[in-house]
Amino acid sequence: MDIRFFGATREVTGSCALIECNGRKVLVDCGMFQGSRSHERHNRDEFAFDPDDIDAVVLTHAHIDHSGRIPLLIKRGYRGPVFAQQATVDLCKVMWADAGYLNEKEAEWDNRDRRKRGLPLVEPIYTVEDAARAQRHFDALEYQDTCEILPGIAATLLDAGHILGSSIVSLVLNEGGRERTIVFSGDLGHRGAPILRDPAVVTSADRVVLESTYGDRQHRSWEATWEEMGEVLSSVNAAKGNILIPAFTIGRTQELLYVFRKHFEEWGLGAWQIYLDSPMAIEATEIYARHFNLYDEEALAFRGGQSPFEMPNLHMCLTPDDSKQLKHVTSGAIIIAGSGMCTGGRIKHHLKNNVWRRDAHVVMVGFQAGGTPGRALVDGARKLRIFGEEMDVHARVHTIGGLSAHAGQDGLLSWYESFEGHPPVTLVHGEESAMARLQQLLRQRFDADVTMPEFGERLDL
C-alpha cells in the first residue's frame, strides 16, 4: 500500500499520483505540464508506469494540468474507467477536444520546419479523434456518494469549490486487514468566490495530499478585489482604448461574466462592447449555466431562473472571422480571451494588435507560471515576443490578484486545520518556494509531518 508522485512535484502543473493497494493501481489525475517550452516537452515523454497496468483513474477536475494527459494515457494502452463528477465530465469533453485540435496544429507547424530540415516528422500528442475516444471511459460520480471503484478501494468526491465539478477525493484503502484514508485536496477554491460553494470541510484522513499554489501568499479580500476591478473599469475611458483580459476559459471566464453582470451599472459597463473571444469558453459558459445545482445560495438567488452570465452588450466570437474582426476595433472593447497565461490562443493576436498602444490596458486576473508571457507582463516586461516578433509593451498592465480560484495561504491552513489529529501532509502543485513556506507554517502551527516529494518518490501508506 503506497503512493508515488509523477507530476506537480515542486512545480505547479502535471498533477499525477499513483496509488497501489491490493495489487491494484489507481491514478489520481493525469495532467499536462504547462509553462515554458522545456516544461511542455515533458508531455510527450513516456509515462513512468505502464498505462496498461493502471486499473482506474480518479479525476479531481477538468483543468488541463490535471486532466490533459488522460487521452494520451488511453492512446498508449489504458483501458479502464475515469471517475469524475458529472460537470467535470462535461467540461473535459470541451477541453480535450480543444487540446486535440491544438496538438494537431502544433504537429502540423512543427512538421513544416522538419520537412525543410530533413528531420523525422512528429505525430500530435493526441488528436481530436483520440480525445473523443477517451470520453467514452468516463464514469460519472456525484458529490458525497461513495463508490467502490476497485476491490478494497472506495472513492468519495466532495466539492472543492475551485471550478464547476472540482472535487476533493477521499480514497479509503483496505489491504490485509489494514485501512487507510488518503484525502487529495485537488485544487481548493477561494472561499467566498463567485458562483460556487466553498470547499467542503473534511475531518478524517491518515494522509492529506495538499495543493500549495498560494502556500506563500494571501489573497486580497473580495471587497478589495471588486473595488480594484471597478476602479480599473470605471477609470478607463471607453473612447480611448481597449481592455484585454487573458482568462482561463473554465472558471475564471465565468466568474468575470458573473461579476460584470452583477456590477453592470456600477462599473459603467454599458459604455463598452464586451467580447468573449473563445469558442471553448463559450461552450464552458453554457455548461456552467446548465449545472446551476452546483451554485452557492447567492448565485442561485442572483440567477433568478435565467443564465447569470447574460448582458445586452456581450458578443460571443465563435468563428475565426469573428475574432479577426476585432483587430479593426481600436477603442471601446473589453476582450476576454484565452489563454490565461498568454501562452497561446486568441489572446496572443489581441496582444499583438494592442500591447504597443499607449491607451490600451491588459488586466491580469489569474496565476501566471514562471516562463510564460503572462508572467513577463505581470513582472513589468517592456518587450514581448509574439509570433516571433518582438514588440514594445506600452499598454498599462493591471494585476487583480484577489480573483484567484485557488485558496490562499490562510485558506489552505484553515482547510487542513479541520482534520482531527492533524495527519501527515504531502505537498504538491506549487512552486518550491510556496511549498517550503506552507511546510514551515504547517509544522509551526500544527506540529504536522510535512513532506515535499521529488518526482517518482514513493511513500509507504
Image: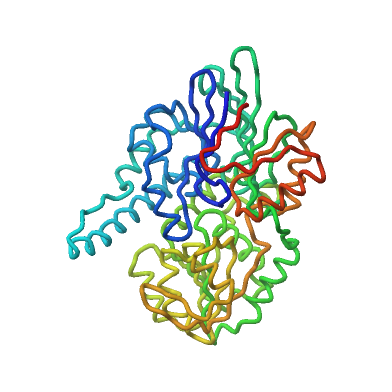
Report the front residue among 327 and 396.
396
Is residue 289 depicted above or below 380 in this figure? above
Report the front residue among 37 and 58.
37
Q: Tell me the quarter of the picture where residue 320 sits.
A: bottom left
Q: Is residue 85 visible?
A: no
Q: Left or right: 14 with respect to 154?
A: left
Q: Residue furthest top?
A: 177
Total of numbered circles in the picture? Answer: 0
| Residue at 65% in and 76% down | 232
Q: Tell me the quarter of the picture where residue 350 sits.
A: bottom left
Is residue 236 depicted above or below 213 in this figure? below
Q: Left or right: 280 with respect to 244?
A: left
How is the structure coloured here? rainbow
Q: Residue furthest right?
A: 445
Is residue 209 depicted above or below 305 in this figure? above
| Residue 203, horizontal then vertical, whole percent | 75, 32
Quarter occupied by the N terminus: top right
Report the front residue among 4 and 417.
4
Q: Left or right: 37 with respect to 244?
A: left
Q: Is residue 404 visible?
A: yes
| Residue 38, horizontal then vertical, whole percent | 43, 57
Is residue 133 depicted above or below 381 in this figure? above
| Residue at 71% in and 47% down | 439
Quarter occupied by the C terminus: top right
| Residue 154, horizontal then vertical, whole percent | 58, 23
| Residue at 25% in and 52% down | 122
| Residue 280, horizontal then vertical, whole percent | 43, 56
